[in-house]
Amino acid sequence: MIRLKDVQMEYENGTRAIRGISLTIEDGEFVFLVGPSGSGKSTIIKLLTGEVEPSGGRIMINGYSVSNISERQIPLMRRTLGIIFQDFRLIEKKTVYENLEFVMRAVGASNKEIRNRIPYVLQLVGLEKKVDSYPTELSGGEQQRVAIARALVNNPDTIIADEPTGNLDPERSLELMSLLVKINQLGTTVVVVTHEKALVDRFGKRVITIESGHVINDSIGGYVGGHIHGKA
Amino acid sequence: MARHNFGYFAREGLRNMFSHGFMTFATIGITVACLLIMGTFTLVAVNADANLRDLEAENEILAYVDEHYTEGQAKALQAELEKIPNVASATYISKEQAMEDFVANYPDEALFHNLDPEILRDRYSIHVEDLEQQGATLRAIDAVKGIDDITAYEEVADGFIAIRNVATVVCVALIVVLFVVSVFITSNTVKLTTFDRREEIAIMRMVGATNGFIRWPFVYEGFLLGLLSAGIAFGLQWLLYTAVAQGVDTNDTLQLIRVLQFEQLWKPVAITFAGAGMLIGVGGSLSAIRQFLRV
C-alpha cells in the first residue's frame, strides 16, 4: 500500500514541486498518475523510490516509512518496488538474461531460483526467445518488455512505471499497457505515470491528476486535455 | 555476501576488466610503473644497506696492550674484552704477527724487512656489532686494565651511519610518496571507469542492490588489476635488476660495489609487489566508487 499524507517537497534551489499532497493507493490497484510537464509527477516518483526526501509530511510504501527511512533500509524498500523507466535503462553490455540475473543477485537469490524465475518472467512478457540477445539487438518495444521483466523478476508488491510508453509507437504502447494490466490482474499494484490521453481513456482505471504540485482530481475515468471526466 | 554470489562477483570483475580494455590497460600501466619505481628504489636501498654492512664489518678498532705485559697477560685480556657489550669479536695479534702483516703490505720496500718486532705492541683487532654504539664501546675498552691505547676511525663510522640513515629516510619517503601517488592515480583511473558505469550503478541502486553488492565486482576488478600489475612489474623488475647487476659486475670502476643476486631477493620482492599491487588496486577501486554509492 502507498500512502502520502500532506507531503511537501521543496528542492534546494527553492522550487516547490509538491505542495501538500495526500493520497492512498491500496494493494492490487491500477492507477494512472497524470499531469502536465512540471506538475510534480516525476518528483512523486522520486519520493516513492527514496531518491529524494520530502520536506514535509509522511510517506508510507509497502510497510516502509520513506519520510524517515535509514540508508540501510532504502535498498530493502526498493526491493518491494519494480521500476520501469521511459528510456528502459537496460545495461547494454549484459544480455537479456544477465540484465535480469543481476537484479536477482542483488537481493540474494540463489542460482536455482535465478534459473527457474528468469525463463518464467521472460515467457510472461513474450521474450523467451531473446534470452541471449543484447539490448541493442532489440526493438524499442522489446527493450521495454525486458524492463518490465526486470521490474517483475523479484516479484515486487508494486510496479511504478515512469512514462513507460514515451519512446514507443501507439501499437507497442497499447501492447505494453495491456501487459501491465495483466500483471495487475495477477495481484501486483501498478502505478503508471503518463501524459498519453488515449491510453488513459482506453483503460478506464483510477486517474490521479497532479497540477502545480497539488492533486486536482482523483477518480475513475479518462484524461482529456488536462481535465478529467470522471465516473466516480 | 551470499556465498553463491562469490563466483558471480569474480566473473563480473573479470569481465569488467576486458570490457573496459583501455582503462584496464591504463590502470595496469600506471600501477606497473609505480611498482617498478618503488621496487627499484627499494632494491637500491637494500643493496646500499648491504654494502654499508660490509663496510661496517671492515671498520676495525685497534686496542694496544701495555708494552710491559707478557704475551700470556696480553692474551688473558681477550675474555675481558669480549665481555664488553657491543663487541662482536676481539682477535689477538702479537707484535710479531703485526710486523709480518706490515711488511707484507710493502713487499718492495727492503728497508722494512729487518725491523725488530719489539718496536710494535701486541694488540687486539676489535669489531663492534652496532657502529652507533661505538663511542661507549671505545670508553669501555679504554677502561680495561692493560689496554694502553686505542685507534678507531670514529669519523668513518659516523660517516657510514649518516649515509645509511639518509639512504633509509630518502627511500622510505620515496616509497610512501610513490605509494600514495599510485593509489591516487589508480583511483582516478578507476574513477573514470566507474564514471563510465555510473548508469549501471544507478540501475543497481534503483533495483535495491546494497552498497556492498555494487562494490564487490569493483573490488574484484581492482584486486585482479593489482595482481596482474604486480606480476608484470615483477617480471620487468627481474629483467631490469639482472641487467643492472651484470652492468655493475662487468664495470671496472664499480668493482667496489657488491650487488646482491636477484635469487636472494625474489621472494620478498614478489610478496611486496603482490601485496602493494593488490592494496593499490583494491584501495583505488574503493576510493573511486565511494562517490557513486550515495543513496
Image (tube, rainbow, N blue to C red):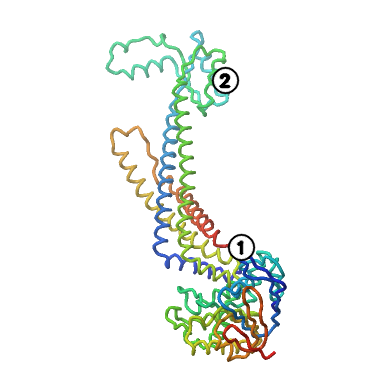
Return the residue nearer the eye: A194 or A229.
A229
Return the residue nearer the eye: B102 or A117.
A117
Residue A173 in percent (x, y) is at 51, 87
Residue A207 in percent (x, y) is at 64, 84
The image quadrant where one finds the N terminus of chain A is: bottom right
Residue located at (42% from left, 11% from top): B120
Question: Compared with residue B257, is residue A173 higher up or lower down, i.e. above or below?
Answer: below
Q: Which mark is residue A14?
A: 1
Which residue is labeled 2 in the image? B80
Residue A167 in percent (x, y) is at 48, 81
Residue A112 visible in the displayed image:
no
Q: Judging from the image, what secondary structure is the residue with disc 1 in?
A: loop
Return the residue nearer the eye: B174 or A83.
A83
Residue B28 in percent (x, y) is at 41, 57
Type of amino acid at the residue the image marks with label 2? Glu
Q: In which quarter of the image is residue B109?
A: top left
